[in-house]
Each structure stands twice: as structure tokens, then as C-alpha cells.
Amino acid sequence: MDGHRRTLSFLVDATGTSRRLRALVAIGYGQPGLAQRLGISVQSLSLILLGHQKSVDARLRSAVADLFVDTWSHPIDGPSGERSRTIARAHGWFGPLAWDDIDDPASMPNVDGGHQEIDAEDEEDPDAEKREPELHLDEIAVERALRGERVRLTQHERMAVVTELHSRHWNDHRIARALHIDPRSVLRIRKHQLKLPAWPMKDQEQDEYA
């Protein structure tokens, strides 16, 4: 009987749990790693991230809160971290410093309180997805695209490639050739979706085909 009582739990509002997970993605934590640390599937994690799950088990809420306390001040650098941040940008998710009360559904994000908080995607972008895009990135496909191979990419995988190549100081035309797409598409992704500035000519990595 005692053992049965220990396994009992209850459902609670998912607002704080969703915001904490989104904040961790916004500072570079990947979904597979988060799911593994929490002992849940990536699919279950995605439902919470996207707001499709309005309540969560109290034990999961506690586990997410503990993970958040341990990790919120330790952002992930490098390509994998930037890919997660790309996903957060596309969804308009905010980082840890945006919330005065992260558990209060009525609380509004304080964007000025922390600029690692992600700006929402430009609503006027004519190429914006009409449905909610998949969260998972095929890292093998991304790596192949970074090598200049012609590979089929999702919206977020393409955004991850643009982010990485832009960080190398490549201009839009060079990125477009690597992705085998029109430079105007790169411009829309870089400027409207990722909010990345164009590199001045003097700062661009030399392109032998320019």
C-alpha cells in the first residue's frame, strides 16, 4: 500500500514547465538531450514545448524545475547550441531572464530583461510556414548541407545551415550556392527569420567565386 502511494501523482498546469523547457532550448540545449535527462520521449517533450499539452505530471514539473535551476546559467555554445537557438528564434521562445514569474500564466515576457531572449519570427515573412514546423533537426543532413552537398532540408534545418554559414562571415550569395537555392531565399531567412545582419564587404570571408 505504501509503495502504491509513492507512485501516485497528479496533474498540474504546464505553463511553467513549457516556459522552462523553451528557455533552455533558447540558450542552446537540444531536445534529445533534455528528453533523455528527464526520462521522457522526444515526442512528449515536443508536445510540451509546442503548448499542445496543457497539464503535466507534478513529478515531471519538479524534474524540469530542478533541471532548469542547474542549467539556466550555463548556455551551450558551438553548432549544436546554435541549432537549438535557431529553433527558438523561429518559434518566438524566450530565454531564462525574460520572466518575472515563469509559472504565472498571466506573466508577460520582459524582452528588455535579457537579450539572449529570442525575438519572434517576422509575421510578414511571405515564406513563413503556415503550420507548426517539426522541432527535430536531422544533424547528418545539416552537416552534409554545410559541405555543399545537395540535400533535402526542412525549414529549420535550412535555417540552421544559414546560421552556421553566416557565422563564418559568408555573404548571402555564397550561402545560396552552398544550399543550391536563390540568394533572395537566403536574404529572407537571414533577415526576416533569423534577424541576422548582413556582413560589411570588408568583414566577409573571401569567396573565390565572388
Image: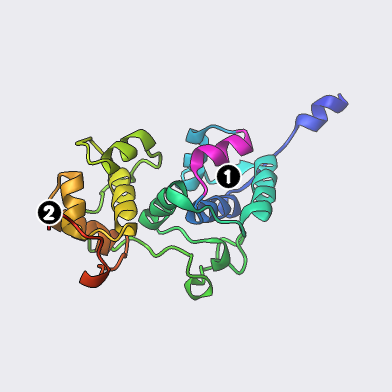
Question: The N terminus lies in which quarter of the figure?
Answer: top right
**Magenta stretch containing residue 34, yes or no?**
yes
Q: Is residue 191 left or right of residue 111?
A: left
For mark 2, give the secondary structure: loop
Q: Position of residue 11 (x, y in %)?
A: 65, 42
Q: Secondary structure at mark 1?
A: strand
The kind of residue tagged 2 is Tyr
- Is the residue marked by circle 2 packed among few (<14), some (14-19), or many (20+) residues within 10 Å? few
Name the residue nearer the viewer: 22 or 103: 22
Residue 12 visible in image? yes
Q: Residue farthest to the right?
A: 2
Front-most of residues 104 and 73: 73
- Asked if residue 151 is among those painted magenta in the image, a careful observer would answer no
In the image, is 183 to the left or to the right of 168? left
The residue stretch that appears in magenta: 29-39
Q: Is residue 130 above or below residue 41?
A: below
Residue that appears at 25% across and 57% down:
189
Q: Residue at x 67, y 51 (%)?
A: 65
User: Which residue is rendered at x = 20% and y = 55% of the image?
Assistant: 186
The numbered disc on residue 55 is 1
